[in-house]
Image: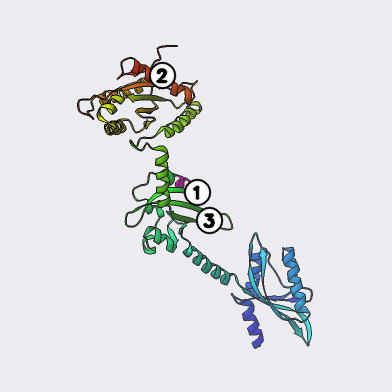
Amino acid sequence: MQQDTLLNSILTSADIIFFSLDLHYCYIDFSTKHYETMKKIWGVEIAKNSNMLNCIQDEKDREKAKYNFDRALNGEKFTLKEDYGDNKLFRTSWEDDYFPIYENGVIIGVGVVVKDLSTEIDKERGEIFQKLINITKSGVVIADAGLEDNPIIFMNDAFETITGYSKDDVIGKNCRFLQGDDKDQPGINIMRKAILNQKSCEVKVKNYKKDGTLFYNLVVITPLFDDNGKLIYYAGFQNDITDLYLIQEKLNEQTYIDELTKAYNRKAFNERLANDIELFHRYNHHFSIAMFDIDNFKHINDTYGHDAGDKVLLELSNHIKSTIRKSDIFYRIGGEEFVILFYETSLENAIMLMEKIRISIQQLRIIKNEMITISVGLTQIDTKDDKNSIFKRADDLMYYSKLHGKNMISTITPHV
């Protein structure tokens, strides 16, 4: 009676996985937990006298199970750690104790007590994951995609090292606090779109540490899905690339910025002009080009010295940069030669804008008793243009201005 009570407790236990089979691998008995497990890992509902091997859907697992049952039916008692389950449903690790069942000294079946190792393995993997996450130099955050505003539920130590924010500062908040007031950035717009579409992305953005210090952040965002394809988390990886960014900016400055005037240089102009012409031919984005140089600049250098000449170049450049529209771009392409690209404006409006600049320059008094003037050639992109033809046309028009009185704008070539 006591044994029956103990067996009944085992069979109805919520935690113990136990089953017994006869010589033909049919169920003699099984615990409630085993019934639930078979349904979970194979999608079948077992019953007494049903053949267990027929319930195992995977051929390799079925062969492995039969081999182990036969060992026990031959009188062997042993313990194995092994994996079972349908990969599409649920597969996990088990510790199985096999033993023969005797009646009157004769083996009549096999009994198996099973321990689910998945919890222990998950715990071990979690501990390993935690260690790996905390030794990485990237700041890592996990955001809950199932909650409103995707709050952070985990951050590693490196995140605090990079940003200065502690777990108390971060947990429960959306990661956008790193943006400060600087929310209008191309990279941020890319992130928003990726999150909306449940896609991964990698962007460079300006972020701010807890003490307000600006840093440049290479952010990688990856959506994480469960086995059913449902989005559950977002993983965010932060990398402080400030030093690398500043080095790259310095290299870009040396490549594309004129050292004296800090205007864009000839290389920058050539690349931009080629790109603008391509956009014009594809999308009909019009632009005009004004090329000009300083009249009698050699006289200034010869009379006042090259330092005075540099002063004229610098102050004239600063004046033009402060005068042109934000949409227009100013270049120094040679000694005293400059270019302005006027965008999305008619030739007539470009002439008006350039005329205001010309008049304002002649009113400057950079050198006492010397009036600074410029000669300008101005033209608009045409359907037949390439970068060489439009540049040559603007250059020809500029020299026409120089040959016909200087301090003027020419827009029409006088000869065919």
Asked whether residue 164 appears in the rendered view, the answer is yes
Q: Nearer the viewer, mark 2 or mark 1?
A: 2
Vertical comparison of 77 with 369: above or below: below
User: From the viewer's perspective, is 308 left or right of 83?
Assistant: left
Amino acid on which the number 3 mark rests in the picture: Leu
Asked whether residue 145 appears in the rendered view, the answer is no
In the rendered structure, find residue 224 and report the number of the disc placed on it: 3
Nearer to me, 353 or 20: 353
Q: Earlier in the sequence, mark 2 or mark 1?
A: 1
Q: Nearer the viewer, mark 3 or mark 2?
A: 2
In the rendered structure, find residue 201 and report the number of the disc placed on it: 1
| Residue named by callout 2 | 396
Nearer to me, 252 or 357: 252
* Quarter of the view holding residue 21: bottom right
Q: Within 10 angstroms of label 3, few (less than 14), some, or many (20 or more) residues?
A: some
SS at badge 2? helix
Amino acid on which the number 2 mark rests in the picture: Asp
Magenta residues, dominant SS class? helix
The stretch of residues the image draws in magenta is: 190-196
Of the 4 image quadrants, the one containing the C terminus is: top left
Q: Earlier in the sequence, mark 3 or mark 1?
A: 1
Pinpoint residue 63: horizontal percent, then vertical percent. Answer: 76, 68
Residue found at the far left of this picture: 369
